Image (cartoon, rainbow, N blue to C red):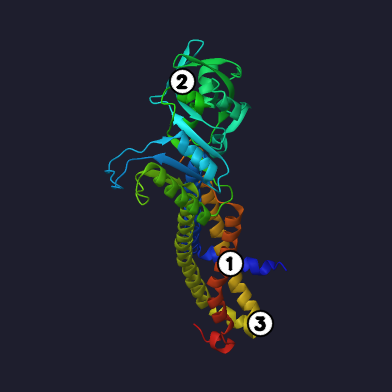
């Protein structure tokens, strides 16, 4: 039940020792402020890192040719490895655990693309339909490259949103229009957005077969991409091992030579990233709680001084019939009040600063939406209440043990 007299006593004590209370509360507020600021900043960095992963499927494997670094079966090192259509087909036919599979080919130097007198340099990539899932491409209007386009080597293109705006403007639809890529007309069948970054939406995807025929080198592929569905980290690593063995046999390089063919397992990279930021969060909580603990020690010391100053008063209370539990409640209530008020000031300032930083840093892809979620806020509230209770517990116990006779002898 709300006890007005008890609260009046608490405010009277605080008012008599304003500077002491302010300095004590500041240490608690600073601890919570730093905890919230560090957690929010860590979240901003995590969001930025996740944004870098967002442009591609997490469970995906990427294969790129490299250059051998080890001799193998009479072959000298420093030999360029080349991926071709047959290598792709071999993986397509024999590799288990693959959901979406695509091969891509780049147009070296990018293609000069024109439409109605407007010109721009964009990346022109040949691909297969499985690229849409691997790249996490979102179609805004129209469609992506399909198997019929590939089978018939059609001159069609699915263009990025930035490419669409630059050539067609914001309002006009590009579907059904023809763009000239290096002097060759391609029909636009769709346009897309991609979370991977600005470069990913300044490109056009065309059928791999068309790319190979129109822009030369009809057998070469520059990269093979696949998704592995809901495979675990261990299963994805097994797929990578099988791929390296299969390719080493076909292309004649040492299976242990990781420079011959680069095989990147994004699931493994993402797992390492998750573990890294979990460690960062644990470290932040340790630092934040240590800072708060220093503030709580200050509050506890102040309450010890308060008990010392009010020894005579507490003795009179007990002589008049006050119970030990009421004395404990009075001291702990004051400690919790100071801790919670100071803590919420620090919490509010921390959240406010994060909101301001988030607005100021909009557009920064490596530091996105620094914030603290509701779980952190609830956790901070519980931490404040527990801290306030701990800060007042020892002084309260000491106050409850004061004997009236001894207290009345105090000067």
**Disc 2 to disc 3, how far (Cα)?**
94 Å
The label nearer to you, 1 versus 2, is: 2
Image quarter in which the N terminus is found: bottom right
Mark 2 and mark 3 residues within 8 Å of each other at the beta carbon: no
Instruction: Identify residue for label 1.
Output: 336
- Dot 2: element: helix
**Disc 1 to disc 2, how far (Cα)?**
75 Å
| Residue depicted at 61% across the width and 53% down the height | 374
Instruction: Identify residue for label 3.
Output: 323
| Residue depicted at 37% across the width and 50% down the height | 255
202 to 320, vertically: above or below: above
Number of marks in the image? Answer: 3
Q: How crowded is mark 1: few (under 14 residues within 10 Å), some or many (20 or more)?
A: many
Q: Position of residue 345 (x, y in %)?
A: 54, 54
Q: Position of residue 150 (x, y in %)?
A: 55, 27
| Residue depicted at 54% across the width and 33% down the height | 194
> Looking at the image, which is closer to me, 72 or 294?
72
- Dot 1: element: helix
Q: Where is residue 144 in the image (x, y as percent from the top left)?
A: 59, 28
Q: Going by the picture, which residue comes out furthest to the top?
A: 117
- Dot 3: element: loop
Q: Residues within 10 Å of mark 3 (few under 14, many from 20)?
A: few
> Looking at the image, which is closer to me, 208 or 274?
208
Q: Pick whichever of labels 1 and 2 is earlier in the sequence.
A: 2
Mark 1 and mark 2 residues within 8 Å of each other at the beta carbon: no
């Amino acid at each position: 039940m709300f006890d007005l007299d008890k609260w009046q006593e608490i405010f009277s004590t605080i008012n008599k020792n304003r500077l002491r209370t302010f300095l004590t509360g500041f240490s608690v507020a600073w601890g919570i402020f730093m905890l919230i600021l560090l957690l929010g900043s860590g979240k901003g960095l995590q969001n930025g890192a996740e944004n870098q992963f967002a442009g591609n499927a997490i469970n995906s494997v990427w294969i790129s040719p490299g250059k051998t670094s080890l001799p193998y079966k009479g072959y000298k090192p420093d030999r360029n490895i080349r991926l071709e259509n047959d290598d792709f087909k071999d993986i397509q036919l024999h590799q288990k655990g693959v959901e979406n599979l695509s091969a891509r080919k780049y147009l070296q130097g990018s293609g000069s693309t024109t439409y109605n007198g407007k010109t721009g340099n964009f990346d022109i990539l040949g691909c297969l339909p499985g690229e849409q899932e691997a790249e996490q491409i979102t179609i805004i209007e129209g469609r992506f490259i399909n198997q019929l386009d590939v089978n018939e080597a059609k001159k069609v293109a699915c263009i990025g949103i930035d490419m669409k705006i630059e050539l067609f403007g914001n309002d006009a639809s590009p579907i059904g229009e023809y763009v000239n890529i290096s002097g060759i007309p391609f029909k636009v069948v769709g346009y897309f957005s991609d979370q991977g970054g600005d470069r990913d939406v300044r490109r056009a995807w065309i059928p791999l077969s068309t790319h190979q025929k129109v822009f030369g080198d009809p057998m070469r592929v520059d990269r093979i991409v696949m998704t592995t569905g809901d495979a675990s980290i261990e299963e994805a690593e097994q797929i990578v091992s099988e791929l390296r063995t299969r390719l080493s046999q076909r292309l004649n390089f040492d299976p242990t030579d990781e420079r011959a063919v680069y095989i990147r397992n994004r699931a493994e990279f993402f797992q390492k990233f998750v573990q890294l930021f979990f460690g960062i969060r644990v470290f932040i909580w340790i630092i934040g709680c240590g800072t708060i603990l220093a503030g709580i020690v200050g509050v506890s010391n102040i309450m010890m001084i308060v008990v010392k100053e009010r020894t005579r008063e507490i003795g009179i209370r007990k002589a008049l019939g006050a119970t030990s539990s009421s004395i404990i409640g009075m001291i702990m209530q004051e400690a919790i009040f100071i801790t919670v008020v100071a803590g919420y000031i620090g919490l509010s300032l921390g959240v406010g600063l994060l909101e301001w930083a988030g607005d100021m840093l909009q557009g920064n892809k490596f530091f996105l939406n620094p914030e603290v979620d509701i779980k952190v806020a609830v956790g901070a509230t519980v931490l404040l209440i527990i801290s306030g209770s701990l800060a007042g517990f020892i002084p309260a116990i000491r106050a409850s043990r004061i004997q009236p006779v001894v207290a009345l002898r105090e000067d």
